[in-house]
């Protein structure tokens, strides 16, 4: 990435480093090599959103006996992605351009990126420091025995906590995820002292609202806690008790789609009210797009169990966001401190801006996190460049680029230089508040577990031995693949922001995972994943080469980014981001790998 005549990551060439607030002055210094017959240098900057070019004449100056060119570029007053390069004039009368690919013609230049963001909306400081713990509620801890009779479903309930989840397709070829283990909110509350002892400062809960599946990403009712988890009183108690221990609670907001069996769609007529499936007389009919009614409708990645919502429908926006008793407001009032937006890149920017505005107005210390698998500043979704990370939308993102780069290195498919470049790209492109407020992790509920990727064929038994001691202390009996987790753990802990862990799962700052996945026990086995928020990235990079000699021969030859593909309804995804099949695999993944979704899991 570094070039000879200009390097935007070196303050000798560009200051300040990285993204800048609206209206900020940016100093540039172009340094041709000695003897170069350059007679003029101009900075050419193109604002993508405004589609406007700006030319800045750089002034020649003597430095150490040769000529350099200096100038000031003033960032636009509105958020912008600025793409810039240099135009050079030569003594022989010719001109050429200089970009990331060096000297070249105008039509071949590769520009650098300058992110311009709005810094007037402040970011809560609590999320960018500490430990986040991600929890898959059904598999964390069961405090009470409950009954599935009369619940939206159908559902089955395992009597034995250690039974294998039903992750294979049924006779119709569907993976229904309709079997439950009965983990509940009271169980989480009972383990708060244990979580606090791990240094956890944020709990990220996968969906907790009423739903027909164990992963609960098919929301049936946003206003009701799933009865198997408890009720609103249990949630308020959890939040209040967590707050006493300095722990914040983050909810998973699944607002891009609902469940087919929801009170809003009501395909099977479970609810007494009229859902969209009952026709135009339903108040929810226009929340969905039918073509034609009733069997064909927009659905998340074509999965009919997850009918997609029209997020621009005024009634829906009022219900979820802007109404006085909206879902966003209701659960923040009940004690939640943050929302994580599922598939944030599939929500309109305006929808995200509206959520942020409500939070900014009524809950200024609440945090808004987005699930995005790529660089959030350059993300294109539905043929549109997204602006949700430029100040008025999301506070931060799940840091999948970090995970992708690190696992690629550990798998042997890229070098330490590639890892460093990937990390510096994020640091350079992201607004500072978003960079320091990212959620860093190595595994989540949507990905294979770290040990699986590093070649661990069988987790240790008994479960009580699945602890950091097993992963991070020398042992001849321990699989070599677990030793390879040491550099991954070091790199994660040296990231400067949040990282998820799995006990259920979670990670914004640093991340530790304990507790329940498919193999967790009601009395609380300890399976940890940890990351600490210390800005020592370069030290981590220097430590990474040791992983090469520790990597298990059975580790995959290419990095794996997604959960296994399901054969359910023959769905396949064309993009290299989260698998739609992950909606059907949460417990299966937890069962196949040593612990529920987390940063580092063992």
Image (cartoon, rainbow, N blue to C red):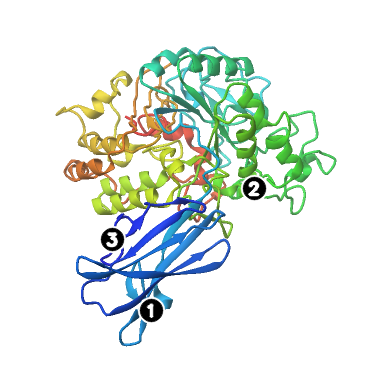
Task: Determine which of the numbered discs, if any, sits on residue 51 in the image.
Answer: none
Count residues near mark 1 (Cα–Cα under 10 Å), then give few for <14, some for 14-19, many for 20+.
few
From the viewer's side, name the closer residue of 292 and 411. 411
Dot 1 falls on a residue whose secondary structure is loop
- Please give left or right for residue 560 compared with residue 371 in the image: left
Vertical placement of residue 574 versus 455, above or below: below
Whether residues under marks 1 and 2 lie with C-beta atoms below 8 angstroms apart, the answer is no
In space, the residues marked 1 and 3 are separated at their CA atoms by 20 Å
Number of the front mark, 2 or 3: 3
From the viewer's side, name the closer residue of 424 and 461. 424
Residue position for label 2: 350
Residue position for label 3: 2
Whether residues under marks 1 and 3 lie with C-beta atoms below 8 angstroms apart, the answer is no
- Quadrant, the C terminus: top left
In space, the residues marked 1 and 2 are separated at their CA atoms by 39 Å
Residue position for label 1: 105
């Amino acid at each position: 990435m570094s070039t000879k005549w200009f390097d935007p990551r070196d303050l000798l060439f560009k200051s300040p480093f990285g993204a800048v607030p609206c209206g900020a002055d940016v100093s540039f210094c172009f340094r041709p090599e000695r003897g170069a017959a350059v007679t003029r240098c101009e900075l050419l900057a193109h604002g993508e959103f405004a589609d406007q070019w700006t030319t800045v004449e750089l002034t020649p100056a003597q430095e150490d006996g040769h000529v350099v060119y200096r100038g000031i570029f003033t960032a636009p007053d509105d958020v912008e992605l600025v793409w810039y390069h240099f135009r050079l004039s030569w003594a022989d009368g010719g001109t050429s351009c200089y970009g990331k690919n060096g000297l070249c013609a105008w039509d071949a230049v590769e520009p650098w990126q300058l992110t311009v963001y709005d810094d007037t909306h402040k970011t809560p400081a609590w999320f960018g420091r500490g430990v986040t713990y991600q929890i898959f509620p059904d598999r964390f801890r069961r405090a009470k025995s409950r009954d599935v009779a009369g619940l939206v479903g159908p559902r089955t309930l395992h009597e034995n906590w250690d039974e294998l989840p039903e992750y294979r397709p049924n006779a119709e070829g569907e993976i229904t995820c309709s079997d439950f283990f009965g983990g509940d909110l009271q169980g989480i509350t009972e383990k708060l002292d244990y979580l606090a002892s791990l240094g956890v400062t944020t709990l990220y809960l996968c969906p907790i609202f009423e739903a027909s599946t164990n992963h609960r990403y098919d929301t049936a009712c946003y206003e009701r806690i799933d009865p198997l988890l408890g009720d609103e009183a249990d949630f308020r108690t959890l939040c209040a008790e967590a707050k006493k221990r300095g722990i914040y609670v983050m909810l998973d907001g699944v607002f891009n789609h609902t469940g087919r069996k929801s009170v809003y769609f009501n395909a099977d007529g479970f609810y007494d009210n009229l859902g969209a499936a009952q026709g135009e007389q339903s108040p929810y009919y226009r929340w969905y797009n039918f073509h034609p009614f009733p069997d064909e409708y927009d659905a998340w990645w074509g999965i009919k169990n997850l009918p997609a919502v029209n997020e621009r429908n005024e009634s829906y926006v009022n219900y979820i966001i802007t109404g006085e008793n909206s879902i966003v407001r209701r659960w923040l009032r009940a004690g939640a401190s943050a929302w994580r937006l599922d598939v944030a890149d599939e929500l309109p920017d305006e929808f995200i801006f509206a959520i942020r505005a409500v939070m900014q107005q009524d809950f200024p210390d609440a945090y808004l996190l987005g699930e995005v698998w790529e660089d959030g500043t350059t993300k294109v979704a539905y043929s549109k460049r997204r602006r949700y990370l430029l100040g008025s939308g999301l506070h931060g993102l799940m840091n999948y680029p970090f995970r992708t780069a690190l696992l690629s290195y550990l798998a042997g498919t890229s070098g330490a230089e590639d890892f460093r470049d990937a990390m510096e790209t994020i640091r350079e492109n992201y607004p500072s508040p978003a960079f320091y407020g990212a959620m860093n992790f190595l595994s989540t509920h949507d990905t294979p577990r770290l040990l699986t990727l590093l070649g661990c064929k069988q987790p240790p038994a008994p479960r009580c031995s699945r602890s950091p001691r097993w992963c991070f202390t020398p042992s001849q009996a321990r699989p070599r693949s677990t030793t390879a987790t040491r550099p991954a753990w070091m790199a994660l802990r040296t990231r400067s922001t949040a990282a998820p862990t799995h006990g259920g799962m979670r990670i914004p700052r640093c991340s530790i995972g304990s507790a329940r996945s498919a193999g967790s026990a009601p009395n609380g086995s300890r399976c940890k994943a940890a990351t600490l928020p210390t800005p020592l990235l370069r030290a981590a990079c220097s430590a990474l080469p040791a992983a090469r000699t520790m990597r298990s021969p059975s580790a995959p030859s290419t990095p794996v980014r997604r959960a296994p593909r399901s054969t359910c309804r023959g769905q396949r995804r064309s993009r290299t981001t989260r698998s739609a099949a992950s909606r059907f695999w949460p417990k299966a993944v937890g069962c196949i790998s040593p612990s529920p979704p987390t940063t580092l899991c063992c």
